[in-house]
Image (spheres, rainbow, N blue to C red):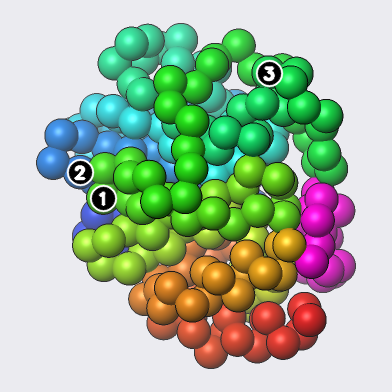
Amino acid sequence: MRVGTVTASTTRLTQYGFVNAYLVREDDGLTLVDTTMKAADAILAESERLGAPIKRIALTHGHGDHVGSLDGLKQRLGGEVQVSMPEIDAQIHAGEREKTAGSWPKLATKPDVLLHAGDRVGSLEVVASPGHTPGHVSFIDTRDRTLIAGDVFTSFGGVEVSNHFYWRFPLAAMATEDKAQDLESARALRALQPRLLLVGHGPAVREPAAAMDRAISRAG
Ligand SMILES: [Zn+2]
């Protein structure tokens, strides 16, 4: 797992060179946004290196490359960690709704909190951004307007909306359920005026407004 510091409070963890999770520092410990795959030990080692426990795990959506280390982390952290997942994606994992595009592996961990727009997870505000999955959410850090946009955008070779095929990362579009809604979500995230764009797949993008505008116009 590759580790990079993206802001004073945010660390990026990259598994297999193409799947990101983020550790966000709070006064009482860390929030982990997404979990990548097969990375529980490496994520816990990084939390130890940062000298802070993981208090919360917040998931942007239910796809396997984002929830893939959840059970391993929950096994080790037990009741010390609070797990939050968007409500609709939690219903898919619970078998209460039909699966949509992309991978939905079996999860033993049940979320403690079901996320809705406007909720807070520490300093992160929950923003509805459905389309890639029906429940997909993004998180904006109210301290510095860092946006963690999950799979609404990718950033390999530049910012792209995940609603259309892009040769640098074709998996994102293949796993996107509702392409029109995904584009609407991309517009809503752009309107938040983020200072830094962090995504599930690809590098961090600083002052991303112009790149997001270009991506949205290519996607429309
Ligand atoms: Zn996804």
Which residue is pictured at 82% across the width and 39% down the height? 100
Mark linked to residue 123: 1
For badge 3, the amino acid type reads: Ala
Above-or-below relation of 142 to 175: below
**Quick one: quadrant of the C terminus?**
bottom right
State which tag comes first along the sequence, 2 or 3: 2
The one nearer the camera, 134 or 59, is 134
Mark linked to residue 26: 2
For badge 1, the amino acid type reads: Ser
Q: Give the range drawn in magenta.
A: 164-180
Which residue is pictured at 65% across the width and 88% down the height? 214
Q: Pointers 2 and 1 in contact (CB under 8 A)?
A: yes
203 part of magenta stretch: no
How far, Cα to Cα, is label 2 from label 1? Answer: 7 Å
Percent position of residue 217, x then y: 72, 87
The answer to whether residue 206 shows anywhere in this view is no
How far, Cα to Cα, is label 2 from label 3? Answer: 30 Å
The one nearer the camera, 44 or 200, is 200
State which tag comes first along the sequence, 1 or 3: 3
